[in-house]
Amino acid sequence: MKEVGHRAIVDAALDLEKTERTPVNNFSNIVTATSAGMTLDDVRRNPKASAECSLRYAKISKSDFVKPVIDSQTVFLDVGEDVKMSSNSYGMIKTPLVQTPEQIDDLALYDPFAAEECPQFTECYVHNLEELARSIDEDYHICGFSWGPVSMAGYLCGADNLLMDMMLNPDLAKKMISKTSRFSADIQRKCIEAGATVMWMSDPTASEDMISPDYFREFDAGPIRDVVKRVKTEGKIPIFLHMCGQTLHTMEQLPDIGIQCFSCDSAVDLSAAKSAVGGRMALMGNISPTQTLYEGTPEQVTEEAYRCIDEAGYNGGFILSSGCEVPGRTADANVAAMGKAGIEYWSDSNSERRAENMRKQE
């Protein structure tokens, strides 16, 4: 099998093409540091260490993507939110910044392009991305990251408060989400300027475990469409969306609002997802991060990875990954098994399995 570059194999999957191997995203962050014997605190404000850890882990995991190690909650420090930082876990927001309707109007979100307005974001996000882009030694896709509009709003005003407003004061909820959609887009645009070649947007508060597909259509579909439109002004940057939990019906709306790849939680039936949207959008997932990657063996990881490819990757348009972030102390051998599976599934030794799977699909 000829070697195919990381970006080329991913871009083909995003174009829903069948490829010579299944591309892999290692869905890593904290584990990238712990695998190298460091903590999140060791790399949070250390771009060189972040880049070295990220590139090392991309190679171990045979990933086609590389991500800087970042604390996603540092984005809220420069708006004045009360965030308790931890040595080896994400910052925890202690008290929501917005607690009254009047505070929504007064909420001043910084311009990510003005470093003097956001020194913490610049130090922890931008510099880590820039150093990774300078240090990259293979043609990996470089992932930027931002929270999606509903989740961003939930962090700023409290998720419970936001969900209550959706039911009792929908105009207020929409006002808040409108502010955060622009903020999310601007963060993504800055990530692209810093070197990101794909954008990873996570919106777990908008999953079906939290809001119905109808509520998603009313409160989040438009804001995400606006994010995509603003981000696309920076060029043809693929935009990935991840939601935790069940999302089978919500995901049917995503191709129409510009999402190119949806990252499925392990709760999602990949076969059903492939049937629902596989002809309109690429899918990514969905090995269990805890039961299989963290608690399992390399052999169990391989078997679940093959199951994922059987269900969603047999005819392209699929990226193999964990169903959510890989836990911080996952064994390197297990994440390496996930990476190898994307190649070895297509080997001659698996020809009978592939043939049987194709018969089932027909």
Image (spheres, rainbow, N blue to C red):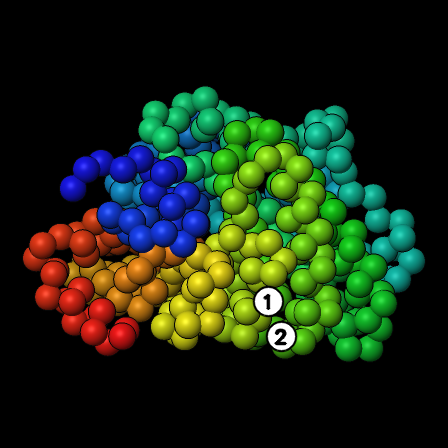
Q: Amino acid at mark 1?
A: Gln
Whether pointer 1 and pointer 2 mark residues with C-beta atoms closer than 8 Å, the reply is yes
User: On the rendered structure, is 116 left or right of 127?
Assistant: right
Q: Amino acid at mark 2?
A: Pro
User: On the rendered structure, is 332 left or right of 8?
Assistant: left
What's the distance in space between the residues labelled 1 and 2, CA to CA? Answer: 9 Å
Residue labelled with disc 2: 213
Which of the labelled discs sits on residue 10, or is there none? none
Q: Is residue 97 visible?
A: no
User: On the rendered structure, is 280 left or right of 339?
Assistant: right
Pinpoint residue 212: horizontal percent, then vertical percent: 63, 77
- Which of the marked residues, 1 or 2, is nearer the chain's N terminus? 2
Tell me which residue sits at (28%, 44%) in the image: 61
Pinpoint residue 121: horizontal percent, then vertical percent: 64, 35
Pinpoint residue 336: horizontal percent, then vertical percent: 23, 48
Rendered position, 126 above or below 174 = above
Rendered position, 283 above or below 311 = above
Residue labelled with disc 1: 253
Q: Nearer the viewer, mark 1 or mark 2?
A: 1
Secondary structure beneath label 2:
helix
In front: 360, or 183?
360
Tell me which residue sits at (66%, 69%) in the image: 216
Tell me which residue sits at (85%, 67%) in the image: 171
Badge 1 density bin: few <14, some 14–19, many ≥20, Cα 10 Å: some
Tell me which residue sits at (40%, 54%) in the image: 16
Secondary structure beneath label 1:
helix
Rendered position, 161 above or below 342 = below
